[in-house]
């Protein structure tokens, strides 16, 4: 019996693995290929080399307008049209911005699932019309797609409360690993346990400004390493990088996964300021890589850290982050304890094989229902 084809739409591409969605798609595609033919739609402008197949995954490169707002919707729209006319058996879409395009898959009667991710309409970067669009698009996703997928129980509650549509919870995965190349952090003259670590795009809802200012007011003599940037001109990001203090190190993007892993492994504390969303890829890595974690107090972060079992929290206040940094400095034994135990938070639901098996069940159910 011929394998059915799954088309995956809404990511930058494969094996472009810097972003959370891209890592997710690579992890499940490499596993799903045993049971399905997999096609991933890629942003043409991001790839100078455009092979048609990598690791058995079929790749289709669709052009778009590479801007902050229009890039993904335009790319997804044309990708979904192509997938519909290519007779895909199943379509998996990521990103709630693509919610309205489920109307196309509905018209073509193709079984579809969408991973809607976080509360995009609340993110400060989508002010005004952007916020209105994301909330509307998320609502449209609940009307047009056969299966809604969220990556946390708290996000499932949001969709139930706001849109009256239940969703299946399938968490984001993580691979547990230990330090292998500690010398890789020497690039920034860093020493083990002598720096705090922040990883994420330099956008307001990740609260890097609050973390930086709170840290600088603390008594810590350690460094604060900020990994990440934005791909477009932005006053918020540029103003952060202009802050002049010898304790701050801005690395920009770190795309080498071995270097990134060592930054996690060797930090004193990983500081997580992400405000909106479910299972966050950067924090799940911090747990899998054995970090002590100081996180913004949100229901999503509480869920991941099991209400303080695997990390500690700060409020969205300057004084709170300052006080918690000073607490970390004084309570090094407690920090050591969190560092040794955080990996235990990577339970079965965060295992990539288990995550993939849950997606397999979704696809089988969708096909049988349509048949």
Image (tube, rainbow, N blue to C red):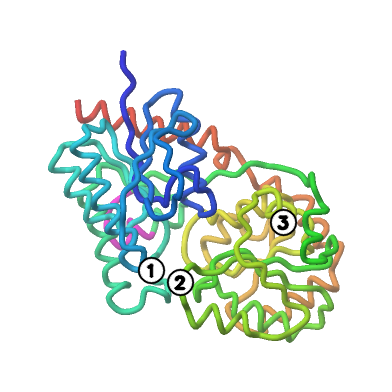
In this rendering, position of residue 288 left or right of residue 222: left
Specify the quadrant that holds the C terminus.
top left
- Farthest left residue? 107
In this rendering, position of residue 41 left or right of residue 275: left
Q: Main secondary structure of the magenta part?
A: helix
Determine the CA span between mark 1 and mark 2: 7 Å
Checking the image for residue 361, the label placed there is: none
Q: State the residue position of label 2.
A: 232
Determine the CA span between mark 2 and mark 3: 26 Å
SS for callout 2: loop
- Farthest top residue? 1
- Span shown in magenta: 158-166
Q: State the residue position of label 3.
A: 264
The residue carrying pointer 1 sits among few (fewer than 14), some (14 to 19) or many (20 or more) residues within 10 Å by Cα, namely few
SS for callout 3: helix
The residue carrying pointer 3 sits among few (fewer than 14), some (14 to 19) or many (20 or more) residues within 10 Å by Cα, namely many
- Mark 1 and mark 2 lie on one chain; the one further toward the N terminus is 1
In this rendering, position of residue 70 left or right of residue 293: left
Q: State the residue position of label 1.
A: 68
Residue at x 75%, y 64% (from the top left corner): 269
- Mark 2 and mark 3 lie on one chain; the one further toward the N terminus is 2
Is the Cβ of the residue at disc 2 closer than 8 Å to that at disc 3? Answer: no
Is the Cβ of the residue at disc 1 closer than 8 Å to that at disc 2? Answer: yes
- Farthest front residue? 48
Vertical placement of residue 10 versus 371, above or below: below
Residue at x 73%, y 77% (from the top left corner): 248
- All told, the count of numbered labels is 3
Specify the quadrant that holds the N terminus.
top left
Is the Cβ of the residue at disc 1 closer than 8 Å to that at disc 3? Answer: no
């Amino acid at each position: 019996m011929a394998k059915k084809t799954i088309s995956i739409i809404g990511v930058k591409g494969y094996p472009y693995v810097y972003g959370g969605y891209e890592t997710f798609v690579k992890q499940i595609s490499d596993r799903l290929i045993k049971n399905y033919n997999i096609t991933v739609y890629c942003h043409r402008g991001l790839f100078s080399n455009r092979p048609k197949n990598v690791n058995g995954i079929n790749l289709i490169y669709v052009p778009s307008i590479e801007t902050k707002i229009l890039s993904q919707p335009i790319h997804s729209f044309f990708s979904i049209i192509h997938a519909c006319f290519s007779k895909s058996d199943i379509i998996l879409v990521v990103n709630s911005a693509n919610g309205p395009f489920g109307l196309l898959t509905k018209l073509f009667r193709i079984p579809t699932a969408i991973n809607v991710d976080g509360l995009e309409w609340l993110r400060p970067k989508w002010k005004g019309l952007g916020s209105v669009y994301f909330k509307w698009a998320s609502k449209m996703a609940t009307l047009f797609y056969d299966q809604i997928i969220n990556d946390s129980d708290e996000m499932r509650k949001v969709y139930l409360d706001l849109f009256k549509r239940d969703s299946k919870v399938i968490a984001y995965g993580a691979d547990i690993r230990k330090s292998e190349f500690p010398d890789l952090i020497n690039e920034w003259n860093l020493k083990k346990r002598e720096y705090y670590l922040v990883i994420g795009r330099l956008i307001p809802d990740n609260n890097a400004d609050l973390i930086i200012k709170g840290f600088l007011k603390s008594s810590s003599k350690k460094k604060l390493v900020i990994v990440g940037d934005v791909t477009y001109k932005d006053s918020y990001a540029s103003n952060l990088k202009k802050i002049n203090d010898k304790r701050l190190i801005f690395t920009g993007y770190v795309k080498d996964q071995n270097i990134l892993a060592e930054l996690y492994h060797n930090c004193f504390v990983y500081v997580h300021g992400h405000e909106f969303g479910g299972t966050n890829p950067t924090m799940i890595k911090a747990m899998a890589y054995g970090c002590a974690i100081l996180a913004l107090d949100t229901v999503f972060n509480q869920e991941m850290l099991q209400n303080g079992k695997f990390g500690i929290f700060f409020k969205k206040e300057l004084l709170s982050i300052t006080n918690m940094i000073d607490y970390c400095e004084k309570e090094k034994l407690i920090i050591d304890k969190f560092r040794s135990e955080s990996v235990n938070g990577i339970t079965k639901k965060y295992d990539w094989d288990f995550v993939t098996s849950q997606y397999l069940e979704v696809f089988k159910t969708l096909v049988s229902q349509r048949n």
